[in-house]
Image (spheres, grey):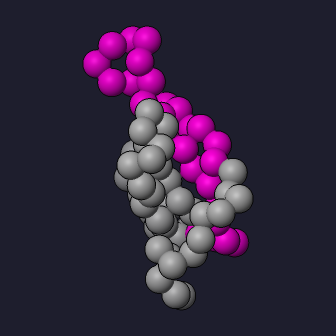
Amino acid sequence: MSDLYEIPLDGVKFRRVCGGNQQEEEMESCVELAEIREGVYAVRDSKNPNAGTLRFTRAELEAFAKLF
């Protein structure tokens, strides 16, 4: 697979995904997630979307989710 960071984000629609909480009951931890190519995802901070993205394959995200 090519470098995931070479895939452009132009026109990509991010959706907000929330779960868990931080230290207070009312605060959820949220990220924004977008499929940028089949099986490839970009993840960014929902509170600071201009801070950049991290990129993962579906297999990497599934392996991460299994840890929790």
The quarter of the picture where the C terminus appears is top left
Relative to the observer, which residue lies in front, 35 or 47? 47
- Total tally of numbered discs in the picture: 0
Residue placed at 65% from the left, 63% from the top?
10
The quarter of the picture where the N terminus appears is bottom right
Mark yes or no: residue 65 visible.
Answer: no
Residue placed at 62% from the left, 55% from the top?
34
Q: Which residue lies furthest to the top in this view?
A: 25
Magenta stretch in the rendered image = 14-40
Q: Which residue lies furthest to the left in this view?
A: 23
Tell me: residue 7, above or below residue 53.
Answer: below
Q: Does the magenta stretch include residue 22?
A: yes
Relative to the observer, which residue lies in front, 15 or 23? 15
The answer to whether 10 appears left or right of 18 in the picture is right
Tell me: residue 30, above or below residue 9.
Answer: above
The answer to whether 8 appears left or right of 64 in the picture is right
Residue placed at 47% from the left, 44% from the top?
49
Tell me: residue 5, above or below residue 11.
Answer: below
The answer to whether 28 appears left or right of 34 in the picture is left
Q: Where is residue 61 in the image (x, y as percent from the top left)?
A: 49, 60
Mark yes or no: residue 1 visible.
Answer: yes
Q: Where is residue 48 in the image (x, y as percent from the top left)?
A: 42, 39
Q: Position of residue 47 (x, y in %)?
A: 44, 33
Residue placed at 69% from the left, 51% from the top?
13
Tell me: residue 9, above or below residue 52.
Answer: below
Relative to the observer, which residue lies in front, 7 or 34? 7
Q: Where is residue 52 in the image (x, y as percent from the top left)?
A: 42, 55
